[in-house]
Image (cartoon, rainbow, N blue to C red):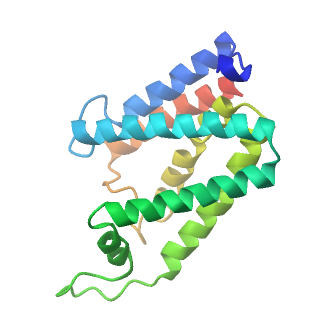
Amino acid sequence: MLLFGERLSSKQLIGFACLLTATWILTGGRFSSRMQKGTLSMCLIASFLFASSTLFGKYAFDHGDFVGVFISSRIAAGITGIIIGLLVPGVGNEIGKMLKPPRGSKKKTASPFWPVLGQTLGAIGFLFVHLAIKSGSAALVNALQAIQYALLVVAALVLKKMAPTLLGENLTRKVLTYKIISLTIAGLGMALVV
């Protein structure tokens, strides 16, 4: 972050430590069936790529106008997506599976409404994240994205009867206790980071 003239205070560093601790608690502090070593490796690589993207984006926003940088970054993302779709076998099949069940399945065809709504809301959120990065600290904006998980847990609790597998796990008392403890620590971390 020194490259971008950002210096984090000791209070903010403690906040980051709280956020990391909360993440560790959410994974159960160990590899579980949901978090295999291979999955963890992919998550670490993705984290590095997202962090690099944020840093380069912040640099571009600081040295160019927002609309031009945002549009060119989205065009680059679209081209990258097309290249991945052409080079990685099975990507087209995965997209198709989002919209229709496999042959022989008794499930009815999924409505494209929900994936389209989710992607639209994600795009709007993405725009606001980039506006925040342009206006402030890239590191702090990314730290505050932990709020997403808190909202997901709240939504899963509210929609528990309608969508019991929203989080991909049973919300037993033990799981819920872990989530409440980790979200409390994350909240403390966010308070220290801001």
The residue that appears at 68% across and 55% down in the rendered structure is 72
Report if residue 99 is visible in the image. yes
Q: Is residue 108 above or below residue 169?
A: below
On the image, the x and y values in percent for residue 56 come to: 63, 36
Q: Residue furthest top?
A: 10
The residue that appears at 48% across and 38% down in the rendered structure is 49
Q: Nearer the viewer, residue 139 or 27?
A: 139
On the image, the x and y values in percent for residue 62 come to: 78, 35
Placement of the C terminus among the 4 image quadrants: top right
Q: Is residue 57 above or below residue 160?
A: above
Q: Is residue 170 above or below residue 11?
A: below
On the image, the x and y values in percent for residue 145 come to: 60, 42
Q: Is residue 46 above or below residue 18?
A: below
Report if residue 180 is visible in the image. no
Name which quarter of the figure residue 169 lies in.
bottom left
On the image, the x and y values in percent for residue 7 come to: 70, 15
> Relative to residue 61, is residue 78 drawn left or right?
left
Placement of the N terminus among the 4 image quadrants: top right
> Relative to residue 109, is residue 89 drawn left or right?
left
Q: Nearer the viewer, residue 192 or 76?
A: 76
The residue that appears at 31% across and 60% down in the rendered structure is 88
Q: Nearer the viewer, residue 27 or 133?
A: 133
> Relative to residue 45, is residue 77 drawn left or right?
right
Name which quarter of the figure residue 59 lies in.
top right
The residue that appears at 27% across and 85% down in the rendered structure is 107
Q: Residue furthest left?
A: 104
